[in-house]
Image: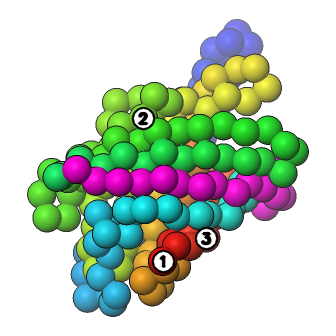
Amino acid sequence: MRVLFKTACMLMYASIGLVLFACGSVSIDQYKAEKPALDLQQYFNGTVEAWGMFQDRSGRVVKRFKVRIDSRWVGETGTLDEHFEYADGTRSRRVWTLTRQSENRYIGRAADVIGEAVGQVQGNALRWQYVLKLDVDGKTYEVDFDDWMYLLDDQVMLNRSVMSKWGVYLGEVTLSFHKRK
């Protein structure tokens, strides 16, 4: 009986989350006229640094970090080699392989991404959607990311990622990117 009750509660919360998420979704097309236009292959070519934090669902900052991204493109394929250094001294690395599919669409792959990340660029904005294997306290969770990046000028880009599981909001990652000249 308890298992049935727990399952029913999980389904109810997931359904509510999906409805709320669907109602609150913003279209990338809204940014089509925004300037400066984001050229993903130009911005992520060379070294980019970023500073960020993860906030849990209550808004509490749980992790702070710095990232160095060494990036390069060969034709329509880019490699973003991300080196994370967290405030607690731990380090991690993620290597993305991005492939341009068309003028405004990209596919991304990384070892901890399940399947493919799907990206679309319009104007100054990029939206990535993907499922990430996230290690927390020795356990691995599959977490949905709705990742938005906004180019402010030729050097600065802001990033806001909403994390969810079964449509239930878990928290947010905020990053500020700075491209070296």
Residue highlighted by disc 3: 176
**As shown in the figure, which amino acid type bears the numbered disc 1?**
Lys
Q: Please indicate whether residue 117 sits to the left or right of residue 76 in the image.
A: right
Residue 70 sits inside the magenta stretch: yes
Q: Residue at x 47, y 84 (%)?
A: 152
**Is residue 124 visible in this depiction of the protein?**
yes
When asked about the image quadrant of residue 126, the answer is bottom left
Whichever of labels 3 and 2 marks the residue nearer the N terminus, that label is 2
When asked about the image quadrant of residue 44, the answer is bottom left
In the figure, 111 relative to 75: above or below? above
**As shown in the figure, which amino acid type bears the numbered disc 3?**
Ser
Labels 2, 1: front one: 1
User: Which one is in front, 92 or 134?
Assistant: 92
Labels 1, 3: front one: 1
Q: Position of residue 170 (x, y in %)?
A: 66, 47
Q: CA distance from mark 3 to mark 2?
A: 21 Å
Q: CA distance from mark 1 to mark 3?
A: 16 Å
Magenta span: chief secondary structure: strand
Q: Which residues are magenta?
A: 58-74
Residue highlighted by disc 1: 181
Local SS, label 1? loop
